[in-house]
Image: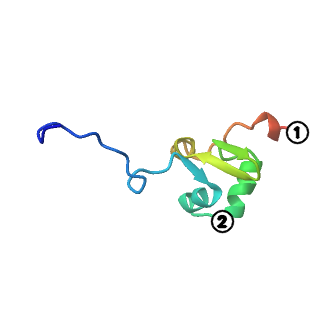
Amino acid sequence: MSSTEERPQFEDHHEQPHAVLTADEVAKLLRVNRKTVYAAFKQGEIPGGRRIGGTIRFSRARVLEWLGQGQACAPRSPRGAR
């Protein structure tokens, strides 16, 4: 590769926001307590969450989209509609 050719750019995980967030990271993003995130997820208020074993992971894009939409609640999941 010559010095004039562009080198491939690799994403630096320190510069790029994570696509998947933990409950702690969502809490920090929302500036609330982690317990508030868990309760809101259980009530179907925060979208983009998936339970994986004993943890919950959230889609950063879905959470940010939800925040941009204002106060509306996320649609309830079938699991939450007991």
**Helix, strand or loop for disc 1:** loop
Q: Residues within 10 Å of mark 1 (few under 14, many from 20)?
A: few
Pinpoint residue 21: horizontal percent, then vertical percent: 58, 51
Quadrant showing the C terminus:
top right
Name the kind of residue labelled 1 in the image: Arg
Pinpoint residue 36: horizontal percent, then vertical percent: 70, 60
Q: Is 17 placed left or right of 26 in the picture? A: left
Residue at the bottom extreme of this rendering = 33
Q: Is 48 placed left or right of 14 in the picture? A: right
Q: Residue at x 73, y 46 (%)?
A: 51
Q: Quadrant of residue 2?
A: top left
Task: State the residue position of label 1.
Answer: 82
Mark 2 or mark 1: whose residue is earlier in sequence: 2
Q: Residues within 10 Å of mark 2 (few under 14, many from 20)?
A: few
Q: CA distance from mark 2 to mark 1?
A: 26 Å
Quadrant showing the N terminus:
top left
**Proximity of marks 2 and 1: CB atoms separated by less than 8 Å:** no
Name the kind of residue labelled 2 in the image: Asn
**Helix, strand or loop for disc 2:** loop
Q: How many marks?
A: 2
Between residues 2 and 55, which one lies in front from this camera angle?
2
Q: Is 9 placed left or right of 1 in the picture? A: right
Between residues 43 and 71, which one lies in front from this camera angle?
43
Image height of 19 relative to 15, above or below: above
Task: State the residue position of label 2.
Answer: 33
Residue at the front extreme of this rendering = 1
Identify the colour scheme used.
Answer: rainbow
Q: Quadrant of residue 6?
A: top left
